[in-house]
Amino acid sequence: MHGEPNKTQGGGLQGAGEFIRVVNASKVYQTQDGGEVEAFTNFNLEIEEDEFLVLVGPSGCGKSTLLKMIVGLLPPTRGAVYFQGTEVLSPRTVQSDRHILYGMGNSGFCPGCSCMSTAARSAAVPA
């Protein structure tokens, strides 16, 4: 992170060119037997406007959980997610004239493709 976030007049967070900001986010899931599973803890991320980002990692490391938090489908257990300076509390928060693509990874999306070739092909698609 580039230092502490700044408060805007509307109470949201704003930094130079920050489009999406994840601040000390954690997500804990409750198991059926009353236990807990942490998807990730104290995660921080800044995505600048017009930046292209690909999340790559093993199954179960929290990629989909993070994306669902960014688009407002899932709240963080702790911490916060901000979109253009406003805290993301629901999918309605993430309305913009900018394109945000959330692609679920599964073998039906591009059978036989590696994740690197799929990411490279996605980067070549004009917005």
Image (cartoon, rainbow, N blue to C red):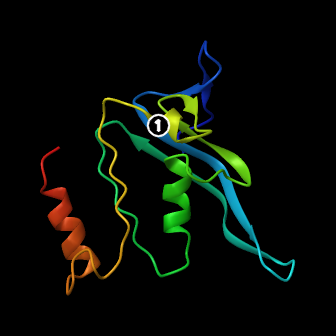
**In the displayed structure, does residue 41 sit left or right of residue 96?**
right
**In the displayed structure, does residue 118 sit left or right of residue 38?**
left
Q: In percent of the image, x 24 and y 67: which residue is there?
A: 119
Residue reaching furthest to the bottom: 112
Q: Place residue 48 in its image quadrant.
A: top left
Residue reaching furthest to the top: 9
Locate residue 64, reporting x and y percent.
49, 65
Locate residue 36, reporting x and y percent.
80, 74
Q: Secondary structure at mark 1?
A: helix
Q: Quadrant of the C terminus?
A: top left
Q: Nearer the viewer, residue 37 or 49?
A: 37
Say if 1 sits above or below 110 in the image: above
Q: In percent of the image, x 52 and y 56: which residue is there?
A: 68
Q: In percent of the image, x 21 and y 77: which residue is there?
A: 110
Q: Nearer the viewer, residue 73 or 43?
A: 73
Locate residue 23, reporting x and y percent.
62, 45
Q: Quadrant of the N terminus?
A: top right
Say if residue 45 shows up in the picture. Answer: no
Residue labelled with disc 1: 94
Say if residue 94 shows up in the picture. Answer: yes
Badge 1: few (under 14), some or many (20 or more) residues near its Cα, within 10 Å?
many
**In the displayed structure, does residue 41 sit left or right of residue 68?**
right
Q: In percent of the image, x 65 and y 50: which residue is there?
A: 75
Say if 75 sits above or below 82 in the image: below
Question: Number of labelled discs?
Answer: 1
- For badge 1, the amino acid type reads Val
Locate residue 50, reporting x and y percent.
28, 39
